[in-house]
Image: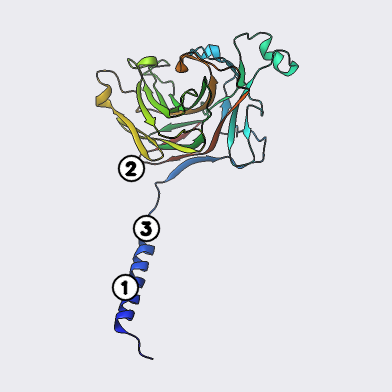
Amino acid sequence: MKISHRILASTLGLALVSLTITQSASAITLPKLLWSQSFNEKVGTKVSTKFWSYDLGNGMGWGNQEREYYTNKAENISMDGKGNLVITALKLDPDNPKDQYITNWCGDCVYSSAKIVTRGKLAFKYGSISARMQVPEGVGMWPAFWLLGVPRSTCDGWPSCGEIDIMEMRGSDVYHTVSTLHGPGYSGGGGLSSYFFTADPITPGFHNYRVDWLPNSIKFYVDNELVGAQTKTSVAPNDWVFNAPFYMILNLATGGNFDAGALDESIQKAEFKIDSISYRQLRGYGQLIRY
């Protein structure tokens, strides 16, 4: 049987192309994974105490006039059995005995919710930190994924130790999220914010929120789209306080001054879902610190 030279050449060419693609694909490697969290445990499972602890109590005490009470109860924070960690804000009922341990003495508390931190367990310095999450809507709902500077000799708490807000969202506006740096001279309402805007509501699905953090520079991304960046030069003459370890925080606040103090108290339940978190090296930078 005769084989056309043209067909044979074409076949060999395709084989070479296939081999090149295969070799190229095998040569592509992601930056080194330093730490990750997935939440595939059975429904009701709590977060690992190896990495996380709980901040507990009245949100009014956090300085933002929030209206939640943070607990460590599974109803407020646990796995959903579908691959997600869910932080749930639940409307408190002062007539319900199970809520009265809060409402009997905390008249400002409208919801129970949860806040977890890696403080004293893990810290991060430089690298790429990302999380795939679904945020809730509703006036006054305030989900956040953020980092705080570990206390050190060169600073004395907030804001001098720094804050990196990878993602905050106002539940009253489902078309944008906010990423912000806070430091000495640029904190609170004067923080350096970048905004992600979308034509479609962000709340129905999951999105990836990321910070790429190098010495003297920080960039924020949503779904791999660059949202904003700051550098040591851009914050000058204020101090750049981000060349140091930070710890991670996840929480769902309610009310507070971030959403102009508004709160829709008809909301009975709101859920902040976290599918996964990853921490990778970036251009050779990235240090996971275990305590």
Residue drawn at (70%, 13%) of the image: 94
**At numbered mark 3, what does the secondary structure look like: helix, strand or loop?**
helix
* Residue 265 drawn at (x, y percent): 59, 16
Left or right: residue 20 compared with residue 158: left
First in residue order: circle 1 vs circle 3: 1
In the displayed structure, 285 sits above or below 261; it is: below
* Residue 42 drawn at (x, y percent): 66, 41
Give the residue type at disc 2.
Arg
First in residue order: circle 2 vs circle 3: 3
**Mark 3, residue position:** 27
**Mark 1, residue position:** 13
- Residue 19, quarter of picture: bottom left
Residue drawn at (69%, 9%) of the image: 104
From the image, state whether disc 2 or disc 1 is nearer to you: 1
Residue drawn at (66%, 36%) of the image: 45
Q: Nearer the viewer, residue 2 or 164?
A: 2
- Residue 126, quarter of picture: top left
Whether the residues at callouts 1 and 3 have beta carbons within 8 Å, the answer is no
* Residue 141 drawn at (x, y percent): 53, 22
Residue drawn at (43%, 32%) of the image: 124
From the image, state whether disc 1 or disc 3 is nearer to you: 1
In the displayed structure, 197 sits above or below 82; it is: above
Crowding at label 2, few (<14), some or many (≥20) Cα neighbours within 10 Å? few
**Mark 2, residue position:** 283
* Residue 87 drawn at (x, y percent): 58, 29
In the displayed structure, 8 sits above or below 243; it is: below
Give the residue type at disc 3.
Ala
